[in-house]
Amino acid sequence: MPKPFLPLVGDKTLFAQAIARCGDAAQFAAPIVVTGAAHLGHVEAQLGASSNAAVIVEPSARNTAAAIGLAACRLEPDAVMLVCPSDHHIGDKLAFAAAAAAAAELATDGWLVAFGIEAKVPETGFGYLKRGEAIGDAGFRVARFVEKPSFEKAKEFLAEGGYAWNGGIFAFRAGDFLRELAEHRPDIADAVRVSVAQGREDGRRFHPAAAPFDAIDGDSVDYAVMERTTKAAMVPADMDWSDIGNWQALQAARPCDDQGNSVVGTAELVDCRNVLVESDGPRVSVIGLEDVIVIVDGGEVLVTSAAGAQKVGKLAGALNQ
């Protein structure tokens, strides 16, 4: 089961939480979910039959610029799109709604807006946005997009100030995005338009034509548009955000005891600090350890230091996971 469709933080799945965050009809229109065919069943099961969401079924995976382009082509040019990954955790819904309102204000004036997540630690797993001059009271120009830095460079960013994490959340008018995409990656823009024009509707599902879409040389929205446009802006967002990108991030997003320990399933911890245990069955006992992660999934057991958790991709069989 892919990450968005699991209840990793709280009782609802990350996908369901993402939909619920945008559920206030006074601020948000009905959602459009862009998904691959492999996950269509997960999406529709978790939306429920009564949902007013529309679903666009990608013929193939061609990265985020093309996926966002599909949705933009299905909207009126002046519609403000709020682009949200469905596998993130946002603990402060009010701060999210406020950032979305500020981003919409800028987007209405023609800006392509990124959420600048407040950087509180020198994180090397995210890209950064450098804040430029103010745009009224709503936000700032983006002075520079920065690739994932080294630890030393990330510490410099925090010490200097004016840098935020690029959380992959954006707002812009559909027409503005398509114009920028056509300017900087006309091949993607043309293929998306043809794919939508030749697509077909099936209830709330929309199926873009496969042949033109499959021919796209995919690219991320950051590389294809945001880092090239002269209209890039950002709004500050301090909203208890996490991309739940590794076991440490999951532990940080979950409630912990006074020693920083987090347990899901049956476990007993004695003299432990900052230990994460998740077991779907067997009882786990941990004594006298610090900064350790223990995961039991059926017949599979993972034991790693918190620092080593980033290396799970080196395990045999990791690609199958």
Image: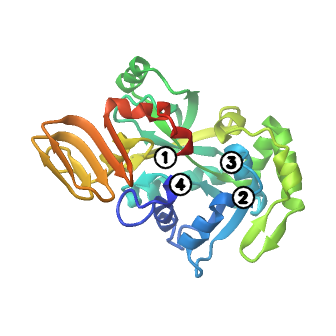
Q: Which residue in the protein does label 2 denote?
A: 71
Residue type of the residue flagged with mark 3: Gly
What residue do we see at 75% from left, 40% from top?
A: 218
Please say if the residues under marks 1 and 4 sit with CB atoms less than 8 Å apart: no
Q: Residue furthest left?
A: 271
Tell me residue 211's x, y (percent). 88, 52
Number of the label disc, if any, that sits on residue 137: 1
Q: Which residue in the protein does label 3 denote?
A: 110
Residue type of the residue flagged with mark 2: Ala
Residue type of the residue flagged with mark 1: Asp
Query: What color scheme is it?
Result: rainbow
Distance of mark 2 from mark 3, alpha carbons?
Answer: 18 Å
Tell me residue 309's x, y (percent). 38, 35
Q: Earlier in the sequence, mark 2 or mark 4?
A: 4
Q: Which residue in the protein does label 4 denote?
A: 2
Please say if the residues under marks 3 and 1 sit with CB atoms less than 8 Å apart: no
